[in-house]
Amino acid sequence: MFRISISPEAKSQLKSIKKRHQNAIKIVIDDLKENPYLGKPLGRELTGKYSYRVGIYRIIYKINKKDKTVQILTAGHRSSVYN
């Protein structure tokens, strides 16, 4: 099982999302503890990071295999999360 770490930026972004979507995102974050490879690997300048789709929202995260940690970097609307 992996440990979850959420960046201050991601925490702030999560607070701005509607409650019903926040709950769906929290469920996904719990799923990432069991299997962090559920998301899609990203390329180009985001190489080494993963994206998980939750409706119109995306969770961007990276995996540290050595420490068994999933670090949530950003979470927000798909139109702005990759910037």
Image (cartoon, rainbow, N blue to C red):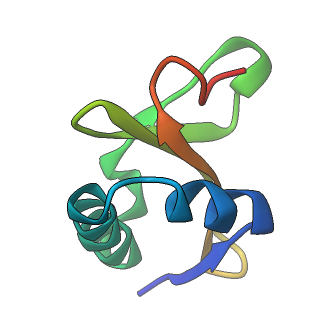
| 3 to the left or right of 22 | right
Residue drawn 63% across and 40% down?
Answer: 49
User: x, y percentage for residue 19?
Assistant: 29, 65
Q: Nearer the viewer, residue 13 or 32?
A: 13
Residue drawn 49% across and 82% down?
Answer: 2
* Quadrant location, the N terminus: bottom left
* Quadrant location, the C terminus: top right
Q: Is residue 63 visible?
A: no
Using the image, determine if residue 6 lies above or below residue 52. Answer: below
User: x, y percentage for residue 5?
Assistant: 65, 77
Q: Quadrant of residue 8?
A: bottom right
In this view, which residue lies farthest toward the top? Answer: 44
| 70 to the left or right of 48 | left
| 25 to the left or right of 6 | left
Number of numbered markers: 0
Q: Nearer the viewer, residue 70 or 16?
A: 16
Residue drawn 79% across and 18% down?
Answer: 45
Q: Quadrant of residue 12?
A: bottom right
| 72 to the left or right of 40 | right
Residue drawn 43% across and 38% down?
Answer: 58
User: x, y percentage for residue 74?
Assistant: 64, 48
Q: Is residue 5 visible?
A: yes
